Image (tube, helix red, strand yellow):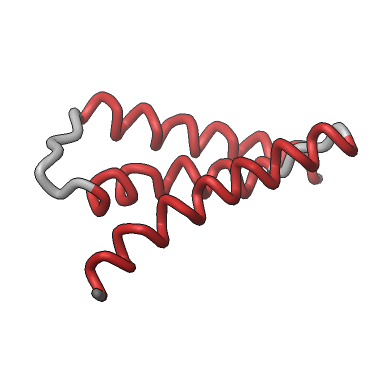
């Protein structure tokens, strides 16, 4: 039960983050770059937790890391 719940929570939270950010963007034309960056940082762990046999390539892992870092820097730059 614990493994099944653990496998489901992180992907549901990531989907929730993307859906809420899409709704906020459509309503207010604002994007919270910090939440999207967090979703990029957590995505590899969510994929690995959902299917432990899946071997993620290092390219995808580093691509999500770089995208997350760029979004984080953009968030700092825009909010200052």
Q: Is residue 4 above or below residue 57?
A: below
Compared across the picture, whether 22 is left or right of 29 comes to: left
Q: Residue at x 61, y 49 (%)?
A: 35
Q: Is residue 35 above or below residue 22?
A: below
Percent across and percent down for residue 12 are: 47, 53
Q: Residue at x 60, y 41 (%)?
A: 18
Q: Residue at x 15, y 49 (%)?
A: 52
Comparing 42 with 10, the one in front is 10
Q: Quadrant of the C terminus?
A: top right
Q: Residue furthest bottom?
A: 2
Percent across and percent down for residue 73 are: 61, 38
Q: Quadrant of the N terminus?
A: bottom left
Comparing 14 with 32, the one in front is 14
Compared across the picture, whether 8 is left or right of 36 comes to: left
Q: Residue at x 70, y 42 (%)?
A: 21
Q: Residue furthest right?
A: 28
What is the quadrant of residue 53 in the picture?
top left
Comparing 52 with 34, the one in front is 52
Percent across and percent down for residue 3 are: 22, 68
What is the quadrant of residue 57 in the picture?
top left
Q: Residue furthest left?
A: 53
Q: Is residue 1 above or below residue 7?
A: below
What is the quadrant of residue 70 in the picture?
top right
Q: How many marks?
A: 0
Q: Residue furthest front?
A: 1
């Amino acid at each position: 039960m614990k493994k099944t719940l653990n496998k489901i929570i992180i992907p549901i939270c990531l989907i929730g983050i993307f859906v809420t950010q899409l709704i906020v963007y459509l309503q207010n034309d604002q994007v919270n770059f910090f939440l999207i960056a967090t979703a990029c940082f957590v995505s590899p762990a969510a994929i690995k937790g959902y299917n432990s046999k899946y071997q993620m390539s290092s390219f995808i892992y580093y691509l999500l890391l770089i995208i997350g870092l760029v979004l984080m820097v953009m968030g700092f730059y825009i909010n200052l």
